[in-house]
Amino acid sequence: MTNTRFLNPDTVQQPTSRFSQAVLHGPAARRLIISGQVGAKADGTIVDGLAEQTELIFDNLFAVMRAADMELKDLVKLTIFCCAPGGAQTVREIRNKRLGSHAPASTFVQVAGLANPKYLVEIEGEAIREA
């Protein structure tokens, strides 16, 4: 049984997409902090296009989670950094498709640039597995 709770209190604005305002977890949990993932394959090849990079980022994010013996239901937070003007809708649609009904806390930040000028988006995450 999990003690993790996804919260959207009535006293704050309700999410405008599929995410939660907060996530509460119990004291006995393993916490995985996932560095920003980018649209690069294992060999370093950077894929072209915002949608293509976002899809690959979710593949990479899930691969890191699997390496820590975690799965989608354990994902509690995403932070998305995007430097593609107007890219929020594309990233949101892919996030919603890849997460299904799962709605972790999420923040979207429009930035001027990322570590490599070919990167259009970077996503970092946190996962919690209750003990």
Image: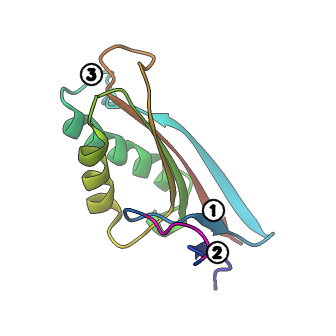
**Which range is magenta?**
11-15
Quote the CA–CA distance across marks 2 and 1: 8 Å
Question: In terms of secondary structure, what is the magenta stretch mainly?
Answer: loop
- Disc on the earlier residue, 3 or 2: 2
Identify the disc placed on residue 4.
2
Specify whether 114 is left or right of 4: left
**Amino acid at pointer 2:** Thr
Residue 8 pos. (x, y %): 56, 73
In the picture, the quarter occupied by the N terminus is: bottom right
Quote the CA–CA distance across marks 3 and 2: 37 Å
Q: Secondary structure at mark 3?
A: loop
Identify the disc placed on residue 45.
3
Crowd rating for badge 3 (residues with CA inside 10 Å; few <14, some 14–19, many 20+):
few
Is residue 11 depicted above or below 42 in this figure?
Answer: below
Return the residue found at the far top.
117
Residue 38 pos. (x, y %): 38, 31
Residue 106 pos. (x, y %): 50, 54
Q: State the residue at coordinates (28%, 29%).
A: 85
- Disc on the earlier residue, 3 or 1: 3
Is residue 13 shown in magenta? yes
